[in-house]
Amino acid sequence: EIDLGIAFLGMPEVAVTGTNGKTTTVTLIHQMLLASGLDSELIGNVGTPFVSLVEPETLRVAIGSIPKREKLLVAEVSSYQLEAAFDFSPHIGVCLNIEDDHLERHGTFDNYLLAKSRIFSAQRAMEDWAILWADDPNFKKIRSFVKGSFLPCGMATPERLRERNGCFIDEAEERIVFAREGVFEEYSLADWKPLGFHNRLNLAAAIAAARLAGATHDGVAKVIAEFNALPHRIEVVGEINDVLYVNDSKGTNVSAGKVAGDPILSTMKDRKIVLLLGGQAKLGSWEPIREVLGGAVRQVIGFGASGDYIAEQLEVKFDVVADGTPQGKIRSGLWQVPFHRVATLADAVKDAAKSSQ
């Protein structure tokens, strides 16, 4: 589908992949371009298929005679799309992170990493840009596929802040520093609202991609000050009887669950957490979730098609069934966290509300 879109509309200017954070990042890039007075369109895995932009008149034009396009295309691309693409070479490619995911599709983590890395493998040296998270444990493997100009994102260090190209998060100074060909500029994080360090990573990658695609400094700064977290992504949906309800239903893998827990634990230190885990589980290690469990997590509720699988992965020891609800405990270090198994999300919310204070 990507190749068919390229044949009639040309290559997207920007493409973003990664296990987590793709939609937030492409939305930021898109809004930064719009705020800079440029015409931009979001396509791909974010919800608008590339080929849906092809007009009937365009189909009458022979392949190879691609009409001039004023609109910039910002694409979110998944491993599924990349593994099938023949000659994908966006002018600006971004890989945010690589974690255990989609192993039921790709078989091994190395196959999954290979599919993600195809965002860079056909880029042109000296003409295209590759933006990578330089602190990712798999950075070196992904870097080996890069053919275009390399621009790292990561945590600021004195050495990195002297790099000719890069986008680095300086938490001590509450700023992001972007460098291109030795020209440096800063962006304040004072008005940045979304929770969590991972969202600062998404922002750094978006700043780099947007500036390389033609966004202005003022356009980027405007979006930083006004942007709110997207729906279903660590989204505060209400507070009832002093209990805060947070919806992270777009966290569809274990590493995303860990990422969601971190900002809640770090910004709401006086609260206890009731954690709802369910739906259709994916293959991969559950250690990231076990790391979240501890003194702050009051209870875990498993629900949906994979509720029993989740209990198995968290090594729940069942010892009682109350009111038809299987109950047990998860051992996590010195802690024993209560676990309930229920049928549906609605049941899980009711159970959580009943046990929350």
Image (cartoon, rainbow, N blue to C red):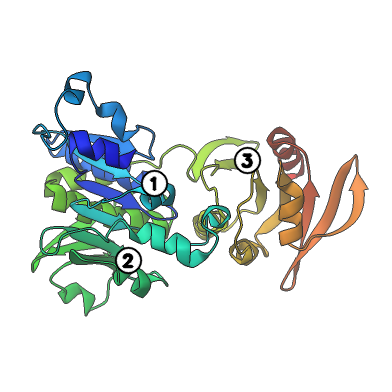
Residue at 20%, 53% (x, y): give it.
92
Choose the circle earlier in sequence order: 2 or 3. Answer: 2
Whichever of labels 3 and 1 marks the residue nearer the N terminus, that label is 1
Q: Residue furthest top?
A: 56
| Residue under numbered circle 1 | 81
Between 62 and 322, which is closer to the camera in this rendering? 62
Closer to the camera: disc 2 or disc 3? Answer: 2
The quadrant where residue 94 appears: bottom left
Q: Position of residue 96 (x, y in %)?
A: 36, 58
Which tag is nearer the camera, tag 3 or tag 1? 1
| Mark 1–mark 2 CB contact (< 8 Å) | no
Helix or strand or loop: what does disc 1 sit on? helix
Q: Point out the image quarter for the C terminus.
A: top right
**x, y (%) of residue 210?**
19, 49
Q: Mark 2 points at which residue?
A: 171
Q: What element carries label 3?
A: loop
In the picture as drawn, the residue positioned furthest to the front comes out as: 62
Residue 349 lies, in percent from the top left, at: 69, 37
Q: Which amino acid does label 3 sit on?
A: Asp
**Callouts 3 and 1 close, C-beta under 8 Å:** no
Name the quadrant containing residue 199.
Answer: bottom left
